[in-house]
């Protein structure tokens, strides 16, 4: 393990960033397909309202993902920092705490969702009468596998920071490929409809969970999950959650925004608007998830070198990640501008009203897309160096400070167009704030070199 991690502080930054990021990007790209394949098959083989049904319950799924990130990303960042500081004796204790916390926290959320399922769907998520049956069927089944959806991704972070980014990538590919195979079987062959899409998802998540457990009982690593390390210590638990709070808050805020967004879409555009935004988000995630892969690749490099006080390498890693992320999202921006209908047709190529609204929403929501890379990587930077206050501020800025107020204000004056334009305006505000904070951080790093 030490040989795998020592090179993070000595090898060329460009080489390391490619080595760690490319597998993560590929894995997240496949994971993006994993996340949208249900909507593709449901849109083509069940009913366009099924897309709305899945879209309506996404805030709950995002909150479960947030719980996974609270522990998984927080513990992994602490893991990398301790390795960089030379405290390798502490890493298994961090892993043990992460393992048990990834059962406890998502478990509480899952139980609450089952108890208040109908209330959540109707009164909080705003499922219409037509969409409600699809939403309830899908969400109930997804909750059965909620533990595995949190545990697999949460533990997978450690595989990458253990110096095996390709193995980490395989974890993501395994679940994605299995989901892509099972979806058409369950939907078209077994005729299970939207329930088939949900079962395909949780079976795939369970397979990924089994794989990460196998890795930490294999000859590839000396790290193990030991019962003695799962006895929770308050100090370490709070430390993990403090570092992981920034990505957790960002995901939770995304869930809140999705809930408010779905209600606004229902109010000003009806079920068609909800389905349209579900399609748009599914397309956007094809760019967003690989960008998160670049984040994941940069995180252990930034964290290790910051812990080792190699600040020049930290600064260089950050700048190279921003440059790579910007180039990547700009390429996606061009494709969305030139071929919007081609992307929409993947989900539905028959409903004229749905296609028209989806094309318009895609063009509006991605107006400032070339700036996404800078804002997302900057937010991740502070989490990587163990500064949760700045990371949380930047993570929440887009969703809480800008997007939510805009969703309340703009639709009252501009209707459904105001709903769609809230997104690029929120992006712009978040980028300006990130640029102001990072300007001073880069000056600080330069002074430490």
Image (spheres, helix red, strand yellow):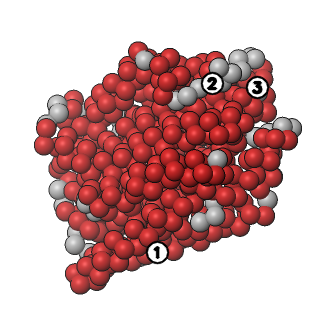
SS label for mark 3: loop
What residue appears at the point 33 percent right and 58 percent down from the top-left corner? 393
Query: Quadrant location of the C terminus?
Result: bottom left
For residue 184, side relative to residue 231 (left or right): right
Disc 2 to disc 1: CB gap under 8 Å: no
In whole angstroms, how far apart are the C-alphas of marks 3 and 1?
44 Å
Task: Kindly check if marks 3 and 2 are in contact, taking CB atoms under 8 A apart as contact.
Answer: no
Task: Say which residue label 1 marks.
Answer: 320
Report the side of 69 relative to 52 (left or right). left
Judging depth in this view, the residue of 207 and 54 nearest the camera is 54
Residue 425, image x, y percentages = 54, 61
Q: Which residue matches tag 2?
A: 128
> Which residue corresponds to mark 3?
46
| Disc number lying in front (2 or 1) | 2
Return the residue nearer the eye: 12 or 373: 373
For marks 3 and 2, give the one nearer the viewer. Answer: 2
Q: Secondary structure at mark 2?
A: loop
Q: Quadrant of residue 53?
A: top right
Front in this rendered view, residue 24 or 88: 24
Where, quadrant-wise, is the N terminus in this rendering? Answer: bottom left
């Amino acid at each position: 393990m030490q040989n795998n991690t020592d090179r993070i502080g000595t090898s060329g930054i460009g080489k390391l960033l490619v080595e760690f990021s490319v597998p993560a990007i590929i894995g997240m790209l496949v994971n993006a397909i994993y996340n949208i394949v249900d909507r593709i098959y449901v849109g083509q083989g069940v009913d366009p309202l099924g897309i709305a049904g899945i879209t309506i319950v996404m805030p709950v799924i995002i909150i479960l993902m947030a719980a996974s990130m609270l522990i998984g990303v927080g513990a992994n960042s602490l893991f990398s920092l301790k390795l960089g500081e030379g405290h390798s004796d502490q890493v298994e204790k961090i892993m043990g705490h992460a393992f048990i916390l990834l059962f406890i926290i998502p478990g509480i959320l899952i139980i609450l969702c089952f108890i208040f399922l109908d209330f959540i769907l109707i009164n909080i998520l705003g499922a219409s009468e037509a969409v409600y049956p699809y939403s309830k069927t899908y969400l109930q089944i997804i909750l059965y596998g909620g533990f595995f959806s949190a545990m697999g991704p949460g533990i997978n972070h450690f595989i990458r920071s253990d110096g095996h980014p390709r193995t980490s990538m395989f974890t993501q590919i395994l679940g994605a490929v299995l989901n892509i195979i099972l979806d058409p079987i369950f939907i078209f062959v077994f005729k299970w409809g939207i329930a088939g899409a949900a079962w395909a998802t949780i079976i795939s998540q369970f397979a990924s969970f089994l794989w990460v457990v196998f890795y930490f009982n294999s000859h590839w690593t000396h790290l193990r999950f030991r019962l003695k390390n799962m006895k929770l210590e308050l100090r370490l638990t709070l430390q993990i959650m403090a570092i992981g709070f920034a990505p957790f808050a960002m995901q939770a805020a995304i869930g809140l925004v999705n809930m408010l967004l779905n209600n606004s879409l229902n109010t000003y555009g009806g079920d068609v608007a909800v389905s349209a935004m579900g399609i748009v988000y599914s397309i956007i995630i094809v760019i967003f998830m690989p960008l998160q892969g670049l984040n994941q690749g940069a995180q252990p490099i930034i964290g290790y070198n910051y812990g080792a006080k190699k600040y020049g390498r930290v600064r260089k890693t950050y700048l190279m990640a921003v440059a790579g992320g910007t180039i990547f999202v700009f390429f996606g921006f061009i494709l969305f501008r030139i071929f919007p209908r081609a992307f929409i047709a993947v989900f539905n190529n028959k409903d004229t009203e749905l296609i028209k609204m989806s094309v318009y929403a895609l063009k509006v929501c991605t107006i400032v897309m070339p700036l996404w890379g800078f804002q997302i990587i900057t937010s991740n930077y502070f989490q990587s160096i163990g500064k949760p206050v700045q990371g949380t501020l930047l993570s929440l800025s887009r969703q809480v400070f800008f997007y939510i107020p805009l969703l309340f204000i703009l639709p009252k004056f501009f209707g459904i167009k105001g709903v769609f334009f809230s997104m690029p305006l929120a992006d712009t505000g978040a980028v300006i704030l990130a640029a102001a904070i990072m300007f001073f951080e880069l000056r600080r790093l330069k002074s430490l070199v």
